[in-house]
Amino acid sequence: ITSSDLVSESFKRISEVDDKVQAFLTLDEENARAAAKEIDEKLGTDNSNGMLFGMPIGLKDNLVTKGLRTTCASKILENFDPIYDATVVNKLKDAETITIGKLNMDEFAMGSSNENSGFQATRNPWNLDTVPGGSSGGSAAAVAAGEVLFSLGSDTGGSIRQPASFCGVVGLKPTYGRVSRFGLVAFASSLDQIGPITRTVEDNAYLLQAIAGIDPMDSTSANVSVPNFAEGLTGDVKGLKIAVPKEYLGEGVQEEVRQSVLDSLKVLEKLGATWEEVSLPHSKYALATYYLLSSSEASANLARFDGVRYGYRTEQPESLIELYKKTRAEGFGEEVKRRIMLGTFALSSGYYDAYYKKAQKVRTLIKKDFEDVFAKYDVIVGPTTPTPAFKLGEKLDDPLTMYANDILTIPVNLAGVPGISVPCGFTGGLPLGLQIIGKHFDESTVYRVAHAFE
Ligand code: GLN
């Protein structure tokens, strides 16, 4: 099969299903076909050039792509054509993947359902009345619907794992620092990570391989050697010690979800692993901590959208202050404004110590909970989300219940450790995800355990 065949298949599938799924914001058909043709002429079907060579991929629309519209699903960037590529995009070019287009998301990655997109609400391919999750909902839905073989998403507080779980695909948030964030439009810089969304664990490992590693353009990317991730996919989990936090199976977790995790643990036991219940005592503070810290960072990061340097600008402002005010009032959606106000408040003098500084301290305690468990166990296992995909509109008027959907994924971002969601069952025709969390920079063990379910 040639790259042109794959790319044609991709566009064919998109034309068949995307008016219903609505995963794509921008397609890059002409360039994609030309790139595929070039690859085919160069090497035909010989793919000794690497596993991703010539394969169609989709990118979340907060990854900047040179000359290809990058909106973050925000009206404020509706017509923004970046002048450079993100490091991950450059790396994919080196691996010679073919970018098919840019995928929908919650505006600036703030949300859990894709309903906060400034343009469209992506649907869950398993049931079009339900949400695909978020914020990387477009990335997960496109892979689930067979529109692309792989995609990249970003995960600040669950935004890769939660949509992967809702859409029945595999999504990894790498260790903080494993993948360069250069060219990822920043939401909360101390939490954001780019990661792969794929159909299989093996594909996921290949894609991470292509994008991982230190980058001089991102001082938070880590100088840690990148192992061969696929090598660890032996299926052998004998002797592995698994921790199951009691907080992850307690109140608020739907019974079918709990059962699917217990069934998955039985599978791992059969393969020679053992598991015990543990506690992450500070996880009950994770949601509050996350919303204080992520909103604070977002309020600073989003200050750059001022109508002067980027994207949308209001018409005929009467003063500079009015230019800022009207541009931001007209350009940002509700949820983004809510986060900016929350973050600005938490950082303001007089409140800083009580909110931001306190949240930083609690973050350290949450991180320590994980360190204590990892001193004795190899991985932590639990559900990815408390429920399967919910109905469109169901949580839209109640931001707090929307926030609660990320209760099991957010602690992982605060601790900076890697976590994956793999499909582990169905309920009511909707997929469920198992979350496997590993030690810092130990994606290999996370993959090894996840692979046991394939
Ligand atoms: N749903 C969470 C939020 O709205 C997570 C977002 C993310 O990981 N980008 O902040």
Image (cartoon, rainbow, N blue to C red):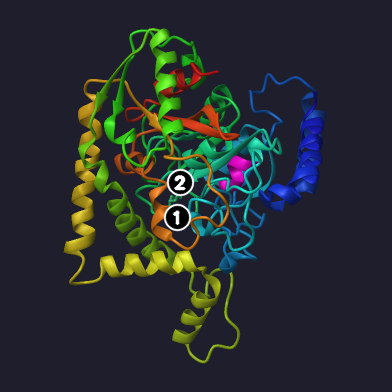
- Classify mark 1: helix, strand or loop: loop
Residue 34 in view, yes or no: no
**How far apart are the alpha carbons under marks 1 and 2?**
8 Å
Q: Main secondary structure of the magenta part?
A: helix
Residue hosting label 1 = 186
Total numbered circles: 2
Binning the other alpha carbons within 10 Å of mark 2 as few (below 14), some (14 to 19) or many (20 upward) gives: many
Label annotation for residue 31: none
Quarter of the rendering occupied by the N terminus: top right
Residue 266 in picture, x, y percent from top left: 41, 15
Say left or right for 293 vs 358.
Answer: right
Residue 207 in which image quadrant: top right
Residue 263 in picture, x, y percent from top left: 44, 20
Binning the other alpha carbons within 10 Å of mark 1 as few (below 14), some (14 to 19) or many (20 upward) gives: many
Q: Earlier in the sequence, mark 1 or mark 2?
A: 2
Residue 168 in which image quadrant: top right
Residue 255 in view, yes or no: yes
Quarter of the rendering occupied by the C terminus: top right
- Classify mark 2: helix, strand or loop: loop
User: In terms of depth relative to the viewer, which is nearer, 215 or 271?
Assistant: 271
Residue 331 in picture, x, y percent from top left: 55, 72
The amino acid type, in three-letter code, at marker 2 is Arg
Q: Which residues, given as a range, are shown in magenta?
A: 137-141
Residue ID at (67%, 23%): 49
Residue ID at (34%, 38%): 412
Say left or right for 226 vs 209.
Answer: left
Residue ID at (55%, 53%): 62
Residue 32 in picture, x, y percent from top left: 75, 42
Q: Are marks 1 and 2 in contact (CB under 8 Å)?
A: yes
Label annotation for residue 181: 2
